[in-house]
Image: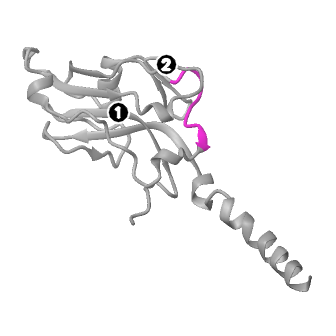
């Protein structure tokens, strides 16, 4: 009988560890609009180290993606469409000396990040003509409607997401790396 109780105690202690969710799966992070650039207008995307307040050179491609990051997923996912200024702006004629052409890509993100009850708009890939002194924010504003917080944080593009702004959510399990066998 003593062996039975010992085995029962061991089972009660180890069972929760065997069936509980790993700590990193319960990790929280943020879904938000990530900002990426391709200054030479070709792959690869580079995560913007400054906000969209700097002047962007003619021939660049600006990328925005509804993405997620946390302690477990440090790097935000870049837009899924490869930047290609030549392709995006092939049919957009040069608009004059004080203007520039910029490719814009808006990726509304993976379905797993979609706020409950919302539908993601169709991704955007286009060319905009803006003033030579236009910043990343000006360029984005020429491509889509923006909702920003009072501090300037980009909350929504083309009305997506409808209400939230940089929401904290549990890490979607499908975004976690699978352990290698």
**Quadrant location of the N terminus in the rendered image:** bottom right
Residue most extreme to the front: 1
Instruction: Left or right? Give the position of 39 relative to 91.
Output: right
Which element type, helix, strand or loop, lies under badge 1? strand
Tell me how many marks there are.
2
Q: Nearer the viewer, mark 2 or mark 1?
A: 2
Residue 70: image location, x then y, percent: 52, 52
**Quadrant location of the C terminus in the rendered image:** bottom left
Choose top left, top right, bottom left or bottom right for residue 34: top left
The type of colouring in the image is: one colour
Q: Is residue 125 above or below residue 47?
A: above
Q: Main secondary structure of the magenta part?
A: loop
Is-magenta flag for residue 162? yes
Residue 155: image location, x then y, percent: 51, 29
Q: What residue is drawn where x is 41% and y is 32%?
A: 109
Residue 74: image location, x then y, percent: 44, 55
Q: Nearer the viewer, residue 98 or 50?
A: 50
Residue 41: image location, x then y, percent: 14, 36
How far apart marks 2 and 1 lie (CA) works out to 18 Å
Q: Residues within 10 Å of mark 2 (few under 14, many from 20)?
A: few
Q: Nearer the viewer, residue 91 or 55?
A: 91
Q: Is residue 158 above or below residue 114?
A: above
Question: Which numbered circle lies on residue 64?
Answer: 1
Q: What residue is drawn where x is 56% and y is 32%?
A: 165
- Looking at the rendering, the stretch of residues picked out in magenta corresponds to 161-169
Instruction: Left or right? Give the position of 126 relative to 85.
Output: right
Q: Are marks 2 and 1 in contact (CB under 8 Å)?
A: no
Going from N to C along the chain, the mark reached first, 2 or 1, is: 1
Q: Is residue 41 visible?
A: yes
Q: Which residue is mark 2?
A: 119
């Amino acid at each position: 009988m003593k062996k039975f109780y010992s085995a029962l105690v061991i089972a009660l202690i180890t069972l929760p560890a065997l069936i509980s969710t790993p700590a990193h799966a319960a990790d929280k992070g943020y879904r938000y609009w990530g900002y990426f650039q391709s200054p030479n207008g070709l792959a690869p995307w580079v995560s913007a180290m400054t906000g969209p307040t700097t002047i962007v050179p003619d021939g660049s491609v600006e990328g925005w993606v509804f993405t997620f990051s946390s302690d477990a997923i440090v790097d935000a996912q870049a837009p899924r469409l490869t930047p290609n200024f030549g392709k995006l702006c092939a049919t957009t004629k040069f608009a004059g000396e004080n203007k520039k052409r910029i490719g814009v890509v808006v990726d509304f993100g993976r379905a797993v990040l979609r706020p409950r009850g919302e539908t993601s708009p169709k991704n955007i890939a286009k060319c905009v003509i803006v003033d030579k002194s236009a910043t990343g924010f000006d360029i984005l504003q020429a491509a889509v409607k923006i909702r920003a917080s009072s501090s300037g944080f980009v909350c929504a593009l083309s009305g997506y997401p409808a209400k939230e702004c940089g929401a904290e959510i549990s890490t979607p399990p499908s975004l976690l790396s699978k352990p290698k066998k």
